[in-house]
C-alpha cells in the first residue's frame, strides 16, 4: 500500500483535532496551521485508501508526495 505526505484542510480547529483522534492519522509536522484562505491545515501521512474517506467526511486532501510503500 502506498503512503503519502498530505496536507489536509478544513474549516475548524476542532475538526482537525478530530482527524487525529478519530481517524488515527499521524501528523508529519507538529502543530496546526491557520490560513484566512484555506482554514486550518495539518500535514499528515495518509494511506491511499484513507483519502476518499476523509474527503467524504468534509476534509480537503492535497497529496504532496509519495513517502513509501508497505506490504500488508
Image (cartoon, rainbow, N blue to C red):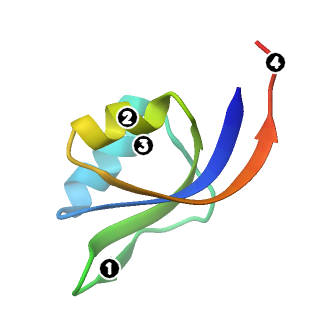
Q: Where is mark 3, residue-wise? A: 20
In the structure shown, which secondary structural element does the residue marked by tag 4 occupy? loop
Cα separation, mark 1 vs mark 4, equals 35 Å
| SS state under label 1 | strand
Q: Which residue is mark 4?
A: 71
Q: Earlier in the sequence, mark 2 or mark 1?
A: 1
Residue 14 appears at what percent x and percent y? 22, 54
Mark 3 and mark 1: span between their CA atoms? Answer: 16 Å
What numbered label is drawn on residue 23? none
From the image, state whether disc 3 or disc 4 is nearer to you.
4
Pointer 1 residue: 34
Q: Which residue is mark 2?
A: 52
- Residue sitting nearer the eye, 23 or 67: 67
Q: Position of residue 59 (x, y in %)?
A: 28, 50
Quarter of the image for residue 70 reads top right
Q: Is 38 on the left or on the right of 63, as rendered? A: left
Dot 1, crowdedness within 10 Å: few (<14), some or many (≥20)?
some
Binning the other alpha carbons within 10 Å of mark 4 as few (below 14), some (14 to 19) or many (20 upward) gives: few
Q: Percent from the top left, x then y, of residue 1?
A: 71, 26
Q: Viewer-proximal residue, 22 or 70?
A: 70
- Of marks 3 and 2, which one's residue comes earlier in the chain? 3
Amino acid at each position: 500500500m502506498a503512503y503519502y505526505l498530505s496536507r489536509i484542510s478544513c474549516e475548524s480547529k476542532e475538526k482537525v483535532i478530530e482527524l487525529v483522534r478519530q481517524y488515527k492519522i499521524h501528523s508529519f509536522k507538529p502543530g496546526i496551521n491557520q490560513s484566512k484562505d484555506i482554514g486550518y491545515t495539518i500535514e499528515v501521512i495518509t494511506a491511499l485508501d484513507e483519502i476518499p474517506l476523509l474527503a467524504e467526511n468534509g476534509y480537503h486532501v492535497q497529496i504532496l508526495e509519495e513517502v513509501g510503500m508497505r506490504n500488508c
